[in-house]
Image (cartoon, rainbow, N blue to C red):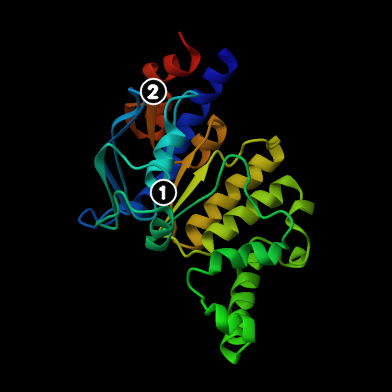
Amino acid sequence: MAADNKSVKMTGGAVKNGASSGQAAGTKDSGAVPTLEVKNLSISFGGLKAVDGFNVVIGKGQLYGLIGPNGAGKTTVFNLLTGVYKPDTGTILLDGKNITGKKTIEINQEGIARTFQNIRLFKELSVLDNVKVGLHNHHKYSTLEGILRLPSFYKVEKEMNERAMELLSVFDLDKECDYKASNLPYGKQRKLEIARALATDPKLLLLDEPAAGMNPNETAELMETIRFVREKFNMTILLIEHDMKLVAGICERLTVLNFGQVLTQGETSEVLNDRRVITAYLGE
């Protein structure tokens, strides 16, 4: 465990310098409406406060991390942001619009997409069809048009195929477009899940432990993929992650949760060297 502590401190200083340009891009207009603003978000299960008074502000184009020990409430926050749970108290603003209490599909249509710790692809569908599932929010035809195969059906299908192939090409998955999703190696399945999320045209992308189950080479490639997504799509990203090397390498700012409450927030290098954060992780 001491080695982990050391690695956190060693990577912290590099982040501050590496993240500065990204931070400037994400916050260059101090008067701009943030992509996400969460105020006093709370939820209880059976009398236990799973999340208690959570607050965060994430500027446009920022790459932001949410970290904390197991059971701290991180995934519960994601579930609140995406409408899986409805908060007991608090407000969620996306680009200044109140989306608190909306259904999951409504929140996705408003502009929040997510991936999951355990990859949730349609594994028996092709790689191409997995991305097309994400496109149905913006490319629609009626059931009747689909059954009768009217010209409008073929027009929409052509548009979706073209857009899906564009996204797959971005992630170097276009050559595997006809493969079953289950036949892709693990790292490519993670890329496919991100591509499908981006197909919904989000303003905010939530990544729930994207490096889970990856080896060091896959994790290094994932870091580059996340950086690329932020820059290519001008995307605001909030991620949960336990791999501190990944967190230190790409996140500009962090919020640390512990027992459902915010322990600290700030620039990545400062947060990762905070004695309270080290104690929360190492149990000192």
Q: Which residue is at the front of the view, 23 or 93?
A: 93
Q: Distance of mark 2 from mark 1, alpha carbons?
A: 21 Å
Q: Is residue 126 above or below residue 10?
A: below
Q: Which residue is at the front of the view, 4 or 196?
A: 196
Instruction: Using residue 231 as the reference point, say whether residue 34 is left or right of it.
Output: left
Quick check: marks 2 and 1 in contact, CB under 8 Å?
no
Which quadrant: the N terminus?
A: top right
The crowd level at tag 2 (other Cα within 10 Å; few <14, some 14-19, many 20+) is many
Which quadrant: the C terminus?
A: top left
Q: Quadrant of residue 169?
A: bottom right
Instruction: Using residue 34 as the reference point, say whether residue 209 is left or right of it.
Output: right
Horizontal and vertical percent for residue 239?
47, 42
The crowd level at tag 1 (other Cα within 10 Å; few <14, some 14-19, many 20+) is many
Q: Which residue is at the front of the view, 47 or 229?
A: 47
Q: Amino acid at mark 2?
A: Asn
Residue of label 2: 258
Q: Residue at x 33, y 22 (%)?
A: 47
Horizontal and vertical percent for residue 281?
48, 18
Q: Residue at x 34, y 55 (%)?
A: 60
Instruction: Using residue 100 as the reference point, say whether residue 22 is left or right of it.
Output: right
Q: Which residue is at the front of the view, 120 or 28?
A: 120
Q: Secondary structure at mark 1?
A: loop
Horizontal and vertical percent for residue 83?
39, 48
**Residue found at the very far bottom of the displayed protein:** 151
Q: Secondary structure at mark 2?
A: strand
Q: Residue at x 51, y 62 (%)?
A: 232
Residue 259, visible in the rendered structure = yes
The numbered mark, 2 or 1, whose residue comes first in the sequence reads 1
**Residue found at the very far top of the displayed protein:** 284
Residue of label 1: 82
Q: Is residue 227 above or below residue 209?
A: below
